[in-house]
Image (tube, helix red, strand yellow):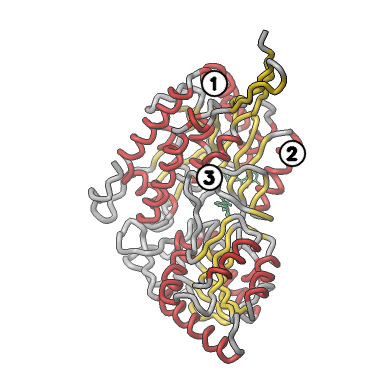
Amino acid sequence: MGNRESRLPILDEPIKEPLKVRNYIGGEWVESKGEIVDIVNPATCKVMGKVPISTKEEIEAAVKAAQEAFPDWRRTPPLARARCMFRLKELMEEQFEELSRIQTMEHGKTIDESRGETRRGIENVEVAAGVPSLMMGYNLEDIASGIDEYLIRQPLGVFGIIGPFNFPFMVPLWFIPYALATGNCIIVKPSSEDPISQVKIAEMAEEAGIPAGVYNLVNGGRTVVTGMLENREIKGICFVGSTPVGHGVIYKKCGETGKRVIAQCGAKNFLLVMPDADLPATIATCMTSFYGNAGQRCLAGANLLVVGEGLSESEHNAFYKKVVDAFVDTASKIRVGYGLDESVQMGPLRDKSKKDTVTKFIEKGAEEGAKLRLDGRKVKLVGDWPHACFLNPTVFEDATPDMNIGKEEIFGNMAAIMRAKNFDEAIEIIHGNPFGNAASIFTQNGKLAREFQYRVECGNIGINVGIVAPMAFFPFSGMKDSFFGILHGQGQEAIRFFTESKVVIQRWF
Ligand code: NAD
């Protein structure tokens, strides 16, 4: 079982030698003919693996294998498919700690963040194991004399699943178990930045008895994605990543080729602090919201709005100062270092280019006139690690929603603190931003909290919580530029996405 008790010694790395990532196609582990690139541990800067950028022929081979496997897999009874999910879950539980450590090594997040990610990934497998009930249709007799009508749900065929770098283990699992449990075949393309977690899942899927060709793994980048989008045999695509790719490439092309699509995209999330909020609890929660996963989370806090509802100008100023001072003081104490060290609270950015992006935003914020209260460029680490990908937490105050740091997705460990005169202005500010992934309010006023959830155009709403990651049995929602499609990953909606409704009308002679 998930063994937090049997924790390994600090910094024990499960991957000792660089791992050669292969593709898994038609039940075979095959080497790619594509270019090979390094997978670098962002904390140690050591090469921990090599991943191929697979070719067009390789994605085509995977689609063919999946197509061939489909007729038998769809005829496999739902309970037998569910048993594969139970077995997959067991294997994940047995390797819980190793899976978590791999995420920390290939992504950079802290080991506790990785354990959280592993847990949520497994929860999706658990929910999908309920497929015999979840996939049931419904019927109604006597719609006319002696005639009954019923609805059945059927799998469609082959689906492509494209993952982002920030949750290398969990995000593809918002889709994988539901696609398989409903009788579809899949091709998973993880981010080439941190693909090892998905290699582990493919290995476990094989061991769990999922037949050859049902589950395929093809590593790479654009060529693989384009190959999926252009292949008419692929019935649908699940994509999680940035808005330009999700909207401009995936959603557009799926529309042209008539594929089903879920495209969960970028974010810029606002957190509101009302004057009646429980301040110590709010600040503590904000630290995880803004700096968890080094801010590389689509549900991360980006902008903190300190709202002066019901306050005079001077009272608002005093409240604002209190919030900012507490935020800066707490953020400055976050321990940054290699995530395998259990005492560390924040790891590095995924790679140097991501650090450079955040660094540029820090420069931009200062140029735009926001006040730099905590400068993450002054790197201070627990342990002696190369600084290449590390930044400590950054805090700007007196930011505004129209500044670049206030409106663009930064996807890093930076907070922009701003003011809103009152609740209505705060809602207006949120709605002025094109994204609609998540928003939270901290208040003890139930009426206002309800008003917030009622009015805010975001898919995930927090009330006195900062990160609103839906459980596996709820959909992972999103609105505006954060989501394109209709149904979402996880739970019932994923079951619906992966099945076609067929209606049958029968006359009984
Ligand atoms: P990304 O868009 O760069 O990459 C996502 C996937 O698309 C990767 O597998 C990548 O190889 C592929 N890809 C990249 N460019 C492509 C192109 N031009 N054509 C075809 N395929 C391409 O995103 P990322 O940097 O890996 O992930 C971070 C982004 O993901 C952030 O914007 C974040 O907000 C978003 N995200 C959203 C959610 C959500 O549920 N809304 C969850 C996690 C991450």
For marks 1 and 2, the one nearer the N-term is 1
Q: Which three-letter amino acid code belongs to the residue tagged 3? A: Ser
Q: Is residue 35 visible?
A: no
- The answer to whether mark 3 is within 8 Å of ligand 1 is yes
Left or right, residue 135 beside residue 149? left
Q: Which mark is drawn over residue 255?
A: 2
**Distance from Cα at disc 1 to Cα at disc 3:** 28 Å
Badge 3 marks a residue whose secondary structure is loop
- Where does residue 134 sit, x and y in percent of width and height? 51, 33
Tell me if residue 217 comes above or below residue 243 in the rendering.
Answer: above
**Mark 3 sits on what residue?**
191
Tell me if residue 445 comes above or below residue 369 in the rendering.
Answer: above
Q: Residue at x 42, y 49 (%)?
A: 117
Dot 3 crowding, Cα within 10 Å, few <14, some 14–19, many 20+: many
- The answer to whether mark 2 is within 8 Å of ligand 1 is no
User: In the rendered image, which quarter is residue 506 located in?
Assistant: top right
Left or right, residue 218 beside residue 41? right
Q: Which mark is drawn over residue 74?
A: 1
Judged by depth in the image, the label closer to the viewer, 3 or 2, is 2
**Rendered-image quadrant of the N terminus:** top left
Q: Which mark is drawn over residue 404?
A: none
Q: Which three-letter amino acid code belongs to the residue tagged 2? A: Gly
Q: Which three-letter amino acid code belongs to the residue tagged 1? A: Arg
- Where does residue 153 sit, x and y in percent of width and height? 60, 27
Q: Is residue 448 visible?
A: yes
For marks 3 and 2, the one nearer the N-term is 3
276 or 193: which is nearer to us?
A: 276
Q: Residue furthest top?
A: 509
Tell me if residue 284 comes above or below residue 57 in the rendering.
Answer: below
- Where does residue 461 sit, x and y in percent of width and height? 56, 60
Cβ–Cβ under 8 Å for marks 1 and 2? no
Cβ–Cβ under 8 Å for marks 3 and 2? no
